[in-house]
Image: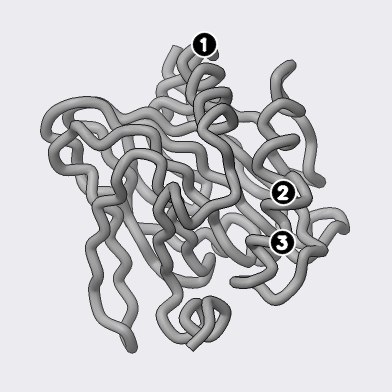
Amino acid sequence: MNARQQFDELGTLMFSEKELPLTREEWQQIENLLDEVEYEHIVGGDAGEGHSVKVCRFYNDVDRPTALHQRSEEISNIVMSNKMKLFYKRIMGTDQLCLRRCQANLLHKDDYIGMHVDQDSNPDYFATVVFHFDSAYRGGEFITRDHQLGDHRYKPEKRTVLINDCSIPHEVSSVELGERKTLACFISKKFTDSTHHRKKFQVLK
């Protein structure tokens, strides 16, 4: 069974650093960038879920995909490079893919992301590609809950990528100890304006 068939059947796949076309330098470039940017504390998501997470947004698509940060292009040049698009093609069936939304998520003790479906934010989302940058934390599991496939729990290692079908309900359990830092990229096969206007986030200053 190839990766596309596995994704169609399972809805969630994990890939280790050695399975990805990224160099160690590119991993480090993203990690350095995520360490340097500023984060906002977000409570309550645009899909109606409850959560507590610190976020730095690089791209958003309330109307259409828009760069929000002076360093957005640095991120896009890596995660949407030609070699990464060829990697995504193995899973998604095409390299004609649009980065509609992209954000860094930072969770510390008692932070979590509540149960939600990414397509409730925008039905144009096809898959979420999540780059992980920490291993030394407790809790913070990625949990999918599907009425056909059942519940599955994932604890990605550092420099692991998790790809999730945007129609599958999921959450991140509360972090008990340490820091959990990820980069979430919402990938679509559509390049047009959004068909659903996303709600605004509530930001705690």
Q: Amino acid at mark 1?
A: Glu
Q: Looking at the image, what colour scheme do you see? A: one colour
Q: Amino acid at mark 3?
A: Leu
Instruction: Say above or below: 56 vs 78.
Output: above
> Which is nearer the eye, 193 or 182?
182
Whichever of labels 1 and 2 marks the residue nearer the N terminus, that label is: 1
Q: Nearer the viewer, mark 2 or mark 3?
A: 3
Residue 64 locus on image (x, y percent): 81, 46
Instruction: Say above or below: 62 vs 89.
Output: above
Whichever of labels 2 and 3 marks the residue nearer the N terminus, that label is: 3
Is 145 positioned to the left or the right of 62 in the image? left
Q: Amino acid at mark 2?
A: Arg
User: Image point 23% across, 63% down: which residue?
Assistant: 153
Q: Looking at the figure, which quarter contains the C terminus?
A: top left
User: Image point 41% across, 41% down: which residue?
Assistant: 159
Q: Which residue position is annotated with label 2? A: 100
Q: Which residue position is annotated with label 1? A: 36
Q: Which residue position is annotated with label 3? A: 86
Place residue 92 in its image quadrant: bottom right
